[in-house]
Image: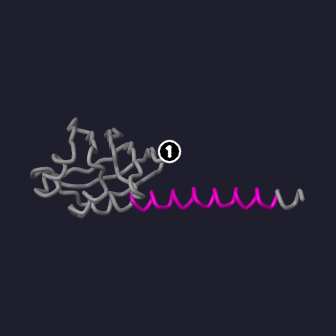
Amino acid sequence: MIYKYLSLFILVFSLSLFSAQTLDRTLEIQVRTLDSLMQTNNPNILNLLAEDVSFGHSNGWIQNIHDFKKDVISKKVDYKSVSQIALKDFKTYKKTASIRRIVHVVGTYKSYDFAMDLSVLEIWIKKAGDWKLWSRQSVEIKN
């Protein structure tokens, strides 16, 4: 009898770990997709964003989805490369995830080229089964 309950506990525990790993993997794919679409200035990036998303850029700009959409379409900032250097922190709570990472970006703003490392905090929320970026704040790392 004890073995039956122990087996059931192990099965339930294993399934919960599997679900958590799947959840983390799904979110990881969304984060990688965000970087990929950003570096190609692809308007499909808008599909990853919550309707009330907020961007805080390293230069002090703050954007909502309408501002961001306008800038993506006009290519106000033309990203050449967006690559994650390090994942510093990753936490989930119910339908919310917090990710801190270091990202190297290369691009052009107006006619000025730039390259920098950014410390980025992203808050993702799960809506209707999909992870959506809800908030993103970046700060330039001065070397």
Q: Nearer the viewer, residue 142 or 65?
A: 65
Q: How many marks?
A: 1
Residue 41 picture quarter: bottom left
- 133 lies left or right of 16: left
Q: Secondary structure at mark 1?
A: strand
Q: Residue at x 76, y 56 (%)?
A: 9
Q: Residue at x 23, y 60 (%)?
A: 80
Using the image as rendered, state which of residue 7 and residue 61 is in the foreground. 7
Horizontal and vertical percent for residue 90? 50, 47
Q: Give left or right: position of 9 versus 53.
A: right
Name the residue tied to disc 1: 89
- Give the residue furthest to the right: 1
The vertical placement of 55 against 40, above or below, is: above
Q: Position of residue 86 (x, y in %)?
A: 46, 51
* In the depicted structure, whether residue 44 falls above or below residue 143: below
**Residue type at mark 1?**
Asp
Q: Quick check: is 31 in the magenta stretch?
A: no
Which residue is drawn at the image coordinates 69% and 60% (left, top)? 14
* Residue 31, percent from left and from top: 39, 57
Residues rendered magenta in the picture: 6-30
What is the basis of the colouring in this image?
A: one colour
**In the current view of this chain or complex, which residue is farthest to the front?**
1
Left or right: 62, with 19 as reference point: left
Q: Quadrant of residue 122?
A: top left
Compared to residue 43, the image places residue 109 above or below, namely above
Q: Magenta-highlighted stretch: main secondary structure?
A: helix
Can you tell which quarter of the image residue 121 is in? top left
Q: If the image is split into quadrants, where does the N terminus sit?
A: bottom right
